[in-house]
Amino acid sequence: MVKEECKALLDALSRVTACYRHLVLTIGGTSDSQNLREELKKTRQKAQELAVANRNKLTAVLRDKAVSKEDKAEFERLWVIFSTCLEILETDMRRALELGHDFPLHVPKRPLVQTGMSGGTSGVAARAMSVQNMKYDEADRNIDVVDLKDLEKEIHQVGEMMYEMEMKVNVPQWTVEAKQNPGAELNSAISMGTSSIGMLDEERKPFCHGSKALAGVIFTAVLLVAVILAVCVAKLS
């Protein structure tokens, strides 16, 4: 039961971390907005909540002396995956901090990342970003600064969490054995693709043979008609 709970928490953390990375990549782009920044904040906070839950669960299990050797090996594998997710989250949070400084929201005529989109939108964008059309109060102008300060604190907290994890549970990654050989998933996908192609070829064989037989019959009929016509022409002449 505990193992399934740990796997479910880890799966949720992986999904939220992947979602956060996707959102970070859009900072400074043409789709950047206040909604995006708020979604970034909610997503990273959710990821941190899941990280704390994962840490507490796995730490308690790995420090339990009553856990069997087989179960402990599985929990250690989950611990390594969890540590990797946390490292990815911290990296993306640092990236979001840098991009947030480079692309503040409420700055007139701020530069945007070129996304490859083109068209007659430059005039509209220029008018939308003009100082006359922008009406922000003091709280709106400071929202970037406040959020970036919070992000700095959260990055520090994630770093502290990673350090405490290493102190409480010593699980060197090189001591954890993988459940599959390197490239096993890729080889499995290739073998599945090859078998699918083989099955498709087998399905096509009857059709191919039938097509060849039909082509032979048509060719023979055409040849007979040609011979008959030639004989008729010869008799008439």
Image: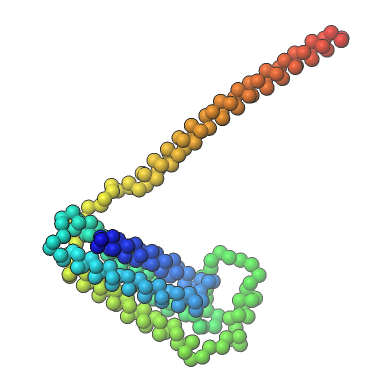
- Vertical side of 219 occupied by 152: above or below: below
- Vertical side of 177 occupied by 171: above or below: below
Q: Quadrant of the C terminus?
A: top right
User: Relative to the observer, which residue lies in front, 15 or 122?
Assistant: 15
* Residue located 33% across and 78% down the image: 154
Residue 125: quarter of image: bottom right
Residue 64: quarter of image: bottom left
* Residue located 35% across and 71% down the image: 47
> Farthest residue toward the left?
65
> Farthest residue toward the right?
237
* Residue located 19% across and 68% down the image: 60
Left or right of residue 26, residue 118 in this image:
right
Q: Quadrant of the N terminus?
A: bottom left
User: Relative to the observer, which residue lies in front, 203 or 17?
Assistant: 203
* Residue located 25% across and 75% down the image: 160
Left or right of residue 177, residue 118 in this image:
right
Left or right of residue 62, residue 136 in this image:
right
> Farthest residue toward the bottom?
138
Residue 192 spot, x, y in % from top left: 41, 42
Residue 145 spot, x, y in % from top left: 42, 84
Q: Is residue 99 visible?
A: no
Residue 32 spot, x, y in % from top left: 51, 74
Give the tally of numbered discs.
0
Q: Is residue 167 visible?
A: yes
